[in-house]
Image (tube, helix red, strand yellow):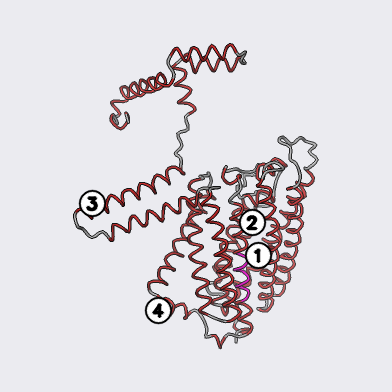
């Protein structure tokens, strides 16, 4: 307040003096000089440590030193969670004030009421984005149900060749992804972490959520025209060949894989490691990857806590779901390898299939070892002869072998996208960059985190294209 009244640089001396006087008055109002002396005497009589007694003398008996200590230790970083809640609440209040003014002056209030409605939606997003809160848990529970429902509709549409069912399934999935990503972006803002990777993730979340929302709005408002152009992307149902239907089924498999991965990621968001903005010794922030490549039992303890911590049960559930995820991604990689083989890239296809199979096997070994770690007590400070270190090392080695195999498989499948040409060349270049980035992560672990995120984003796009444009993935000699 004093700075707001005296903002001029020429008033700096007077401003600092007034602030100092105000802070001294606050100290005296909380504890008078007599009370502070009495409190110090009690601390001295309790045989406190010399360091503690010196600190008490500085804080209680010397106002100047107390203020200096306060200013040095004061956390001046803004509170993102409180700021978001205050912003949402302020928007609601302003909207209601404008509505009241409009009613008093007999003005059109429909557009003003829209501000209030949007503020309520924003407030809802803020509430469900607060980590480990009851609204957040309920929100993610219903998200999982809606994701499963959308995936079931998409799969049913593929099996029955029903374009209407596919449209409804994709619309529900797109709307859910937009809502989920918006809440995730707010959560990331309320739990800020340094680094370029977080900024890239926030940018991708914003772009995906924005374009998904625009597409849904267009489909609702301009439904006839929108669906006319969607139909342009599809061949008539009667002209779909068995080969193209297999390619579409591969897209449905990719969709199920993405849904399973999202379920695992949403469960991982509930861990205290995420809420506390923790990181491992290698700088990994993603909890699932952090438990896969631990350097010591200290990393495992940082992610899941001690033996009876509920986060251990959560991580165990994630690892059990990963067995299903392994089967899905192995089938997907095997399907892409078959497609590459069918298109003539036989050496690359065989090598990619072998690498994907090796990656799945190493992933099984990794999951079994992580589940063993979940049942082990972990020392607070591991010693050089830590009995758990061999298990930690074998888990990390299995994980690195898995990631190396999967990124190698992805790199070997890049010729498939270059061979068919067109827009898929961009997908091939993207996957090549993701695979190379991930391979660098075998030495610098952050590379695995970035490479896997790039691969996931590319697979999301490919899943859509496999279902709406299966002919793009077939060479002219293999097309009908």
Task: Tell us which disc is closer to us: 3 or 4.
Answer: 3
Q: Secondary structure at mark 1?
A: helix
Residue placed under numbered mark 4 in the picture:
224
Horizontal side of 318 relative to 362 (left or right) equals left
Foreground pick, 176 / 449: 176
Residue placed under numbered mark 1 in the picture:
410
Q: Secondary structure at mark 2?
A: helix
**In the rendered image of this protein, does residue 193 appear above or below residue 401?**
above
Q: Position of residue 23 (x, y in %)?
A: 39, 23
Q: Secondary structure at mark 4?
A: helix
Residue 442 appears in the picture as rendered: yes
Residue placed under numbered mark 3 in the picture:
101
Q: CA distance from mark 3 to mark 1?
A: 60 Å
Q: Earlier in the sequence, mark 3 or mark 4?
A: 3
Q: Which residues are magenta?
A: 249-258
Q: CA distance from mark 2 to mark 3?
A: 57 Å
Q: Earlier in the sequence, mark 4 or mark 2?
A: 4
Asked whether disc 1 touches disc 2, contact meaning CB atoms under 8 Å apart, the reply is yes
Q: Residue at x 77, y 56 (%)?
A: 365
Q: CA distance from mark 3 to mark 4?
A: 40 Å
Asked whether disc 3 touches disc 4, contact meaning CB atoms under 8 Å apart, the reply is no
Q: Is residue 188 magenta?
A: no
Please tell me the numbered disc located at residue 438: 2
Asked whether disc 3 touches disc 1, contact meaning CB atoms under 8 Å apart, the reply is no
**In the rendered image of this protein, does residue 21 appear above or below residue 74?**
above
For the residue carrying disc 1, how many other residues have a C-alpha within 10 Å: few (<14), some (14-19), or many (20+)?
many
């Amino acid at each position: 307040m004093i700075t707001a009244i005296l903002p001029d640089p020429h008033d700096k001396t007077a401003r600092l003096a007034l602030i100092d006087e105000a802070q001294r008055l606050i100290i005296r109002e909380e504890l008078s000089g007599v009370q502070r002396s009495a409190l110090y005497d009690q601390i001295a009589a309790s045989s406190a440590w010399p360091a503690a007694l010196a600190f008490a003398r500085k804080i209680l008996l010397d106002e100047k030193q107390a203020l200096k200590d306060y200013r040095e230790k004061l956390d001046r970083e803004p509170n993102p969670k409180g700021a978001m809640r205050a912003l949402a609440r302020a928007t609601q209040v302003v909207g209601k004030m404008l509505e009241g003014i409009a009613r008093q002056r007999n003005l059109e209030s429909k557009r003003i009421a829209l501000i209030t409605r949007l503020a309520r939606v924003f407030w809802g997003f803020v509430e469900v984005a607060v980590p480990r809160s009851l609204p957040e848990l309920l929100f993610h529970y219903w998200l999982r149900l809606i994701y499963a429902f959308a995936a079931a509709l998409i799969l049913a549409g593929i099996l029955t060749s029903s374009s209407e069912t596919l449209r409804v399934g994709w619309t529900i999935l797109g709307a859910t992804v937009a809502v989920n990503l918006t809440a995730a972006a707010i959560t990331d803002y309320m739990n800020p972490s340094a680094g370029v990777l977080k900024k890239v993730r926030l940018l991708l979340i914003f772009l995906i959520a924005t374009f998904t929302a625009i597409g849904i709005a267009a489909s609702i408002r301009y439904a006839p025209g929108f669906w006319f152009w969607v139909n342009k992307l599809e061949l008539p149902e009667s002209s779909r060949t068995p080969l193209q239907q297999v390619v579409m089924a591969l897209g449905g498999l990719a969709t199920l894989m993405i849904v399973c991965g999202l379920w695992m990621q949403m469960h991982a968001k509930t861990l205290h490691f995420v809420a506390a903005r923790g990181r491992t010794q290698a700088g990994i922030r993603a909890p699932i990857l952090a438990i896969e490549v631990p350097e010591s039992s200290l990393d495992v303890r940082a992610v899941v806590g001690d033996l009876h911590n509920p986060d251990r049960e959560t991580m165990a559930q994630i690892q059990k779901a990963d067995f299903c995820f392994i089967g899905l991604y192995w089938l997907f990689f095997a399907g892409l390898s078959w497609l590459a083989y069918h298109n003539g890239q036989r050496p690359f296809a065989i090598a990619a299939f072998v690498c994907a199979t090796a990656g799945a096997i190493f992933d099984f070994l990794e999951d079994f070892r992580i589940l063993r770690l979940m049942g082990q007590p972990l020392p607070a400070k591991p010693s050089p002869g830590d009995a758990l270190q061999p298990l930690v090392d074998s888990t990390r080695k299995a994980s690195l072998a898995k990631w190396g195999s999967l990124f190698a498989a992805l790199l070997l499948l890049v010729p498939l996208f270059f061979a068919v040409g067109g827009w898929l060349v961009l997908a091939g270049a993207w996957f090549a960059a993701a695979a190379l980035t991930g391979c660098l992560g075998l030495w610098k672990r952050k590379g695995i985190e970035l490479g896997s995120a790039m691969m996931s984003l590319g697979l999301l796009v490919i899943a859509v294209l496999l279902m709406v444009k299966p002919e793009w993935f077939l060479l002219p000699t293999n097309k009908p």
